[in-house]
Image (spheres, rainbow, N blue to C red):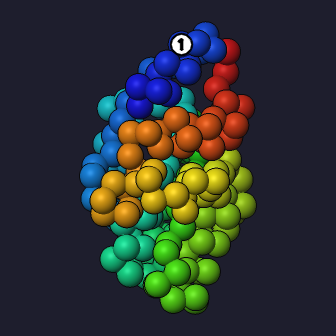
Amino acid sequence: MALLEERLKRERLDYSVVNASVSGETSAGGRARIDDTLARHKPAVVVVELGGNDGLRGLPVAQMKSNLGAIIERSAKSGARVLLIGVRMPPNYGPDYTAAFGSAFAELAKRYRVALVPNMLEGFGERRDMFQPDGIHPTAEAQPEILERVWPALRPLLKP
């Protein structure tokens, strides 16, 4: 969050950043909270990065897509521009689940015509040194890499 705030300031873009995430939350939790969050913050841009915990729990991909779709719809209806950020599952979840999970984000972005970062860990996701001991959560050192993956898709949504 701090890196994004710094980037916005450096680029002279007058936006504040609100981190409305909840650690460990699934897409269902995000869906349950989105209306209140939109009403409270009235965002111009909503960045949706949810689904990873759905995947790690092996929840149905269709359920995740429904939840993310509702979040996108409600965000857009509120007037916010939406950026969807995808994540990938490790291959040990099986080829069918991994493929369905991975394609869900592109399908949602196409359906709702929103900006997409297909995989926020692309380019460094295989580097063990960029992750905490759990092998799932990126380290502080990975945060600049993540911003560099997200910025090209986020920047066009930001009005000077």
Residue 48 picture location, percent across and down: 49, 49
Please name whichever residue, 11 or 143, is drawn nearer the observer in this view of the structure: 143
Please name whichever residue, 113 or 89, is drawn nearer the observer in this view of the structure: 89
* Total numbered circles: 1
* Residue appearing at x 60%, y 64% in the figure: 105
Please name whichever residue, 147 or 18, is drawn nearer the observer in this view of the structure: 147
* Residue appearing at x 58%, y 89% in the figure: 96
Q: What residue is disc 1 on?
A: 9
Q: Which amino acid type is shown beneath numbered disc 1? A: Lys
- The quadrant the C terminus occupies is top right
Question: Is residue 38 placed above or below 13 in the rendered structure?
Answer: below
The residue positioned farthest toward the left in the image shown: 23
* Residue appearing at x 55%, y 62% in the figure: 126
Question: Is residue 7 placed above or below 28 in the rendered structure?
Answer: above
Can the viewer see residue 57 in this picture?
A: yes
Residue 30 picture location, percent across and down: 36, 55
* Residue appearing at x 51%, y 89% in the figure: 94
Residue 75 picture location, percent across and down: 50, 45
Can the viewer see residue 70 in this picture?
A: no
Q: Secondary structure at mark 1?
A: helix
The residue positioned farthest toward the front in the image shown: 129
Question: Is residue 97 placed above or below 39 in the rendered structure?
Answer: below
Image-quadrant location for residue 2: top left
Residue 85 picture location, percent across and down: 56, 52
- The quadrant the N terminus occupies is top left
Disc 1 crowd, CA 10 A, few/some/many (<14, 14-19, 20+): few
Classify residue 95 as left or right of residue 36: right
Classify residue 66 as left or right of residue 13: left
